[in-house]
Image (spheres, grey):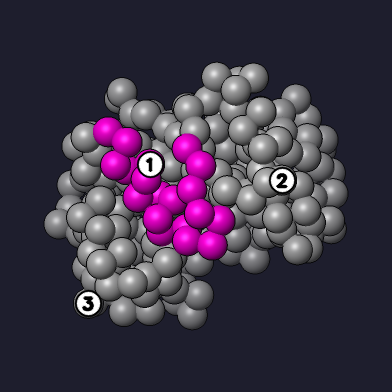
Amino acid sequence: MDTIVSIQARLGSTRLPGKVLLPIGDYRILEWVVQRALWADTEDMDFMVAIGDNPENKAIEELCCRRSYEYMVGPEDNLLKRHLQVARSGDYDTLIRLTADCPFVPSAEITRTYSHHDASDAVYTRNDWPSDADYVMPTGTAVDVFDVELLERLAAEGAMHPNRRPLESPDKYGVEFAPNKEWGQYGDAHMAVDTPADYWRLVDAFEAVQKAPSDVAEWLSQ
């Protein structure tokens, strides 16, 4: 499969504006997500940052230029269209969706979820169960792998988000859940940056362990 990682990014968060450019250790949060994608054990996989088109996001474009990250700018309020623009930028039949506010998304989970999808008949694979099931992954570690054909179908149906409809009707859309049971013990850990408190807790966690995402999850769960 020809695959691209699409990292959605914007600065207009209401609870913590500009969060994806905040630093944790040696990298900004968006840079951490890019690094996690690059560290994933996949062959010849491309990546691109999918940036919203609001004016404040020019700062993300500047970072991408400075770091030589490939990026595309698309509608702020139509996330599905943004990811489809990334998918249509080359001959891709598979898209891995990551979010730029999750600096500790595990590279191994990107690899595992992609491999599971590649070996199955699913058109959408997610490494997390629904929230009311066992083995829920910590917030901030989700990986979504889509067949591009499903994204095209959703766009034709008028959807504006890539996974809301499929997660609401998994049987209808051919969703497969591929949980990692080892992460179930950390299901209550919050590893995404949504609020100022989230950011500083992740800074504290990184300074305390400075290791793999699983060590951060364990620290947060204590």
Q: Residue at x 57, y 38 (%)?
A: 33
Q: Residues within 10 Å of mark 1 (few under 14, many from 20)?
A: many
Could you give the CA–CA distance between mark 3 and mark 1, rounded to whole angstroms?
25 Å
Labels 1 and 2 touching (C-beta < 8 A): no
Give the magenta part as a residue range.
72-90
Label 1 vs 2, first from the N-terminus: 2
Question: What residue is pinned by disc 2?
Answer: 56
Left or right, 179 with respect to 197, comes to: left
Could you give the CA–CA distance between mark 3 and mark 2, rounded to whole angstroms?
38 Å
Any part of residue 102 in sight: no
Return the x and y of residue 11 as percentages of the image width and height: 70, 49
Label 1, secondary structure: give it.
Answer: helix
Label 3, secondary structure: give it.
Answer: helix
Q: Residue at x 60, y 60 (%)?
A: 139
Left or right, 131 with respect to 101, comes to: left
Return the x and y of residue 101 as percentages of the image width and height: 64, 49
Q: Amino acid under label 2?
A: Glu
- Name the mark nearer the viewer: 1 or 2: 2
Q: Quadrant of the C terminus?
A: bottom right
